Image (cartoon, rainbow, N blue to C red):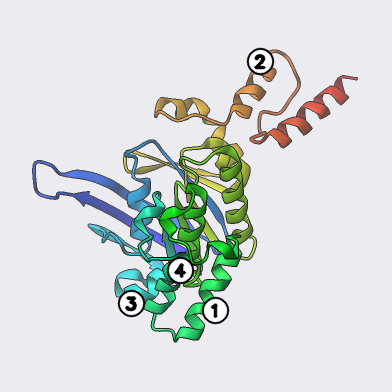
């Protein structure tokens, strides 16, 4: 069943001189199996929103429904096994002496027996593509990309229906970024709902089905990538930008080429330019 966000509000330091409205009347429906990109500048409310989805932060008003039930009536341990959150900095989720113990922590905490716990941990580590030789190393001796794989595996071991990732490619080189994004896309293709918090327009354009743009605690735009990036001038006004492809296609159109400006990826742009050249012939 979908996640439903119903008139969600979050006010930090309510009733003090430091009061800040972090979320303002958020209403969203997140269907099963969708790949969502959540974007916005720093302080727009992205991280605050996703931390409400599994009850890490309690709303000032409004609520979130998961599987048809108000999450505030839900067993929080069970909820966080079904709506998993991978933080931006993997070090915040890694603490055991070796990788395998770290990934075992989640299912063990659910009360599963040792055999089931270890089977889940092994399966999760194989899903994220971490070689066996790293299983008994300290997670803090791994590279940035490997740490992220372990952090993702730790959440996958609890077998969530929804996986939320907060800036999972931050600080990675292009190869590491692509590997992590392909891993996440593969998880979505198994039927898992994915919510990707990102600053990278190229990443969301290449992978997601839907983009939600946050600005000053509110939903500014919500739609498929081509529709959201058609508002590139509005995005610029709030400190964001469309993918480079969007600007290239807009410039070609302005220069008289008969191209559609809907393309948001390099592959889509290539096909549209070839079609335009073919029509010109």
Checking the image for residue 70, the label placed there is: none
Q: Quadrant of residue 40?
A: top left
* Mark 4 vs mark 2, CA separation in Å: 53 Å
Q: Earlier in the sequence, mark 1 or mark 4?
A: 4
In front of the other: label 4 or label 2? 4
Residue at the image point whose x is 48% and y is 60% from the top = 150
Nearer the observer, 113 or 268: 113
Is residue 118 in sight in this rendering?
yes
Nearer the observer, 239 or 105: 105
Identify the residue under disc 3.
75
Q: Quadrant of residue 21?
A: top left
* Mark 1 vs mark 4, CA separation in Å: 11 Å
Give x and y (percent) for residue 124: 55, 68
Checking the image for residue 119, the label placed there is: 1
Do the residues under discs 1 and 4 have CB atoms within 8 angstroms?
A: no
Left or right? Give the position of 22 relative to 15: right
Q: Earlier in the sequence, mark 4 or mark 3?
A: 3
Give x and y (percent) for residue 248: 64, 22
Q: Earlier in the sequence, mark 2 or mark 3?
A: 3
* Mark 4 vs mark 3, CA separation in Å: 22 Å
* Mark 2 vs mark 3, CA separation in Å: 56 Å
Identify the residue under disc 4.
103
Left or right? Give the position of 278 relative to 36: right
Check the image and report above or below for 217 versus 188. above
Give x and y (percent) for residue 59: 26, 59
Residue at the image point whose x is 30% and y is 75% from the top = 73
* Mark 2 vs mark 1, CA separation in Å: 57 Å
Tell me if mark 2 has few (under 14), some (14-19) or many (20+) residues whose alpha carbon lies within 10 angstroms of its own.
few
Q: Earlier in the sequence, mark 3 or mark 1?
A: 3
Identify the residue under disc 2.
254
**Quadrant of the image containing the C terminus:** top right
């Amino acid at each position: 069943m979908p996640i439903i966000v119903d008139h969600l509000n979050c006010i930090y330091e309510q009733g003090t001189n430091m009061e800040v409205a972090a979320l303002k009347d958020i209403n969203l429906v997140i269907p099963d199996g969708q790949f969502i990109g959540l974007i916005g500048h720093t302080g727009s409310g992205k991280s605050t929103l996703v931390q409400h989805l599994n009850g890490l932060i309690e709303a000032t008003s409004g609520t979130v429904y998961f599987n048809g039930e108000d999450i505030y009536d839900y067993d929080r341990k069970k909820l966080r096994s079904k709506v998993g959150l991978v933080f931006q900095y993997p070090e915040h989720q890694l603490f055991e002496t070796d990788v395998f113990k770290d990934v075992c922590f989640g299912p063990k905490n659910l009360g599963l027996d040792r055999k089931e716990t270890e089977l889940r941990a092994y399966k999760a580590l194989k899903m994220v593509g971490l070689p066996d030789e790293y299983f008994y190393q300290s997670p803090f001796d791994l590279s940035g990309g490997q740490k992220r794989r372990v952090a993702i595996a730790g959440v996958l071991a609890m077998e969530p229906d929804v996986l939320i990732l907060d800036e999972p490619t931050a600080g990675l080189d292009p190869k590491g970024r692509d590997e992590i994004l392909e891993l996440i896309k593969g998880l979505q293709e198994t039927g898992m709902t994915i919510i990707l918090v990102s600053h990278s327009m190229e990443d969301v354009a290449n992978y997601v089905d839907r983009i939600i743009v946050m600005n000053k605690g509110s939903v500014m735009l919500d739609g498929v990538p081509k529709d959201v990036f058609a508002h590139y001038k509005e995005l610029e006004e709030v400190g964001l930008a469309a993918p480079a492809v969007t600007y290239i296609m807009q410039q070609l159109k302005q220069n008289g080429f008969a191209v559609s400006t809907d393309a948001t990826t390099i592959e889509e742009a290539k096909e549209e330019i070839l079609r335009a050249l073919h029509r010109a012939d």
